Amino acid sequence: MLILASGSPRRRELLSQAGIAYMVNPSSYKEESPKKKDPKKFAQAQAIGKACEVAAKYPGQWVLGADTIVAIDGAILGKPRNDKEAAAMLKDLSGRKHSVFTGVALVKDDTVYTKVVETKVWFRRLSEEEIKSYVATGEPKDKAGAYGIQGKASSFVDKVNGSYTNVVGLPLAQVCKMLHKAKVGL
């Protein structure tokens, strides 16, 4: 059975929607601070770190790790540490295009499959009041870039180019391809 190295309810929902059998064992991998790094390499390294940390506990089992980040103007936006940081992130994204990267790692013993998926997202211009009101909902707290496209922030999005499920937190089509390649759940 596949082991999901994530406590994300969004990732669990996506795997369940696809009919993938799995169990959850959230990773205790210490995430790096994003700062100014290559977003693709950063997301990939985080996903590998999470999957490998859990895979060490389950020899012979396939473990899926993932990490989603938002990048704009060369800066990586992780999860906001507080409301002020969330509001600043949303202000940066307002009226602009940004990229959402999810690194995915499928690990079993010494075998590692990885993929990084990028989706481009355009936000409409947001008013200060909209940002303040959204931050007050608490929804931005555990989300890269301080928003959840599947939640209240869905009204902020003008256009998406690429995988919608990637923005939610798991590029499902690509994950299914990896699972088929590894013959997981077949």
Image (cartoon, grey):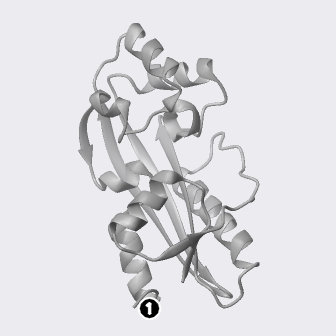
* Residue under the point 46% across and 77% down: 21
User: Extreme left residue here?
Assistant: 159
For residue 130, above or below residue 119: above
Give amino acid for label 1: Lys
Residue 18 appears in which quarter of the rendering?
A: bottom left
Question: Which of the pair 49/129 is nearer the observer?
Answer: 129
Numbered disc total: 1
Image: 149 above or below 65? above
Name the residue rendered at 37%, 36% in the picture.
151
Residue at 54% over, 20% down: 88
Q: Nearer the viewer, residue 32 or 12?
A: 12
Residue 74, visible in the rendered structure: no
Quadrant in which the N terminus is drawn: bottom right
User: Mark 1: few, some, or many residues within 10 Å (few <14, many ≥20)?
Assistant: few
Residue 138 percent location from the top left of the image: 53, 26
Decide: is 42 above or below 148: below
Position of the C terminus, as image quadrant, is bottom left
Pinpoint residue 114: horizontal percent, then vertical percent: 52, 73
Task: State the SS at label 1.
Answer: loop
Expressed as whole percent of the image width and height from the top left, the position of residue 10 reads 46, 52
Res. 93 in view: yes
**Quadrant of the rendered image containing residue 67:** bottom right
Question: Could you tell me residue 31's position as x and y percent?
Answer: 71, 51
Would residue 52 be found to the left or right of residue 139 on screen?
right
Q: Residue at the location (51% across, 31% down)?
A: 140
Disc 1: which residue: 183
